[in-house]
Image (cartoon, helix red, strand yellow):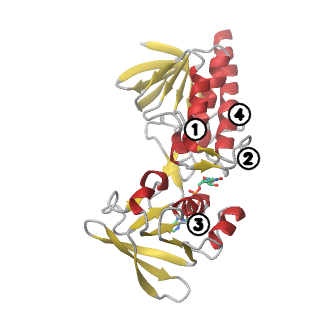
Amino acid sequence: MKRFDAVVIGGGPAGMTAALYLLRSQATVAVVEKLSPGGQMLMTHLIENYPGFPDGIEGWRLADAMAAHVDKYPHVTIADEVTAMEQVPGGHRLKAGGEWIEAGAVVLCTGARYRRVGIPGEKELLGKGVSYCALCDGNFFRDQVVAVIGGGNSALEESLYLSRIVKKLHLIHRRDEFRAQKCFQDRCEVNPVISILRSRVVKEIQGTDKVTGIVVENKKTGEIQTLAVDGVFVFVGFEPQGDFYPEGLARDQAGFVITDDRMRTNIPGLFAAGDIRSKDCRQVATAVGDGAAAAHAAHAYLESLAAS
Ligand code: NAP
């Protein structure tokens, strides 16, 4: 069985940073990533708040730059998913791509994926007008009418991106106050393509072969209206990604992994970084910080293993 000093699971900004720091500390590293490196950056048109890029940087470009940096250092990449993981003496054993590998330290960076809103029609019309990725699917709705559900940074930022493609966009949020940063709110409010519907919930997505409309309830008046739309983009938060975690791993109520400020989980030798962590602020910048801190702690852990 192949053994590495460290295995990093996930190739988003947290995983790439953890791998980079571990490789620079001379550790042998395997990175397991089932898709291309980049994670959610690949679904983001323009990243405007990563320091150093005053005009913003396209998500794919930042992902490529990080991957090129990691690739400067020899390491093993496993283009598959981890399906099982368990503790063994001196480390952890993982099943990746059908093969077992072993490592002294493991850094979990599997990130999060968009949550489903859980209304009739959402599952049935997925890929037929229901989407969770504006960058991937926005072009299918050129000059058409779409709805965006949500009131956080994702919903507003993606609405601004879509407003350059679609004819009309209904931004539907369940409360009066948005959770998103003020700069996104201000830009949505003055955007002529975006119509903001506050205190409204989407009760149903209608259509058979494709989305044709949504049923919307006004939470203040109880009024129900049907809006004709060609597409529905859902951005109602994130949920943790990955179902292979070892038994006994401490997670919060929503399933995110609990760590201390050195990114250590409750299991020795197991670290977590980025969006998979239980935390408030999920940004590329915080994922990078988590990745560096996790690698630092993993390096110290590997040294303690070697000394024992
Ligand atoms: P979020 O911040 O958790 O916001 C989710 C939004 O969806 C909230 O407005 C919430 O409403 C609404 N919502 C949740 N469940 C709903 C339901 N069942 N029906 C209708 N609406 C529902 O999620 P996010 O916007 O995806 O962002 C996730 C994280 O990534 C955040 O930390 C965010 O800051 C970060 N992010 C940052 C950027 C950036 O900085 N450029 C871009 C994207 C994401 P309530 O407000 O009423 O709870």
Q: Ligand 1 is located in which of the four quadrants?
A: bottom right
Q: Is residue 268 visible?
A: no
Which residue shows up at 45% across the image and 29% down it? 85
- How far apart marks 3 and 4 lie (CA) works out to 31 Å
Mark found first going from the N terminus, 1 or 3 = 1
Mark found first going from the N terminus, 3 or 4 = 3
Determine contact: label 3, label 4, CB under 8 Å: no
133 sits to left or right of 53:
left
Mark found first going from the N terminus, 2 or 4 = 2
Q: Nearer the viewer, mark 1 or mark 3?
A: 1
* Quarter occupied by the C terminus: top right
Q: Secondary structure at mark 3?
A: loop
Residue under label 2, please give it: 54
Residue 61's tag is 1
Residue under label 3, please give it: 151
Ligand 1 within 8 Å, label 3 CB = yes
Mark found first going from the N terminus, 4 or 1 = 1
Residue under label 4, please give it: 262
Which residue shows up at 49% across the image and 14% down it? 3
- How far apart marks 2 and 3 lie (CA) works out to 25 Å
272 sits to left or right of 53:
left
Q: Secondary structure at mark 1?
A: helix
Question: Would you call the spot at circle 3 few (<14 residues within 10 Å), some (14-19), or many (20 or more)?
Answer: many
Determine contact: label 2, label 3, CB under 8 Å: no
Examine the rendered structure and indicate whether residue 159 appears above or below residue 302.
below
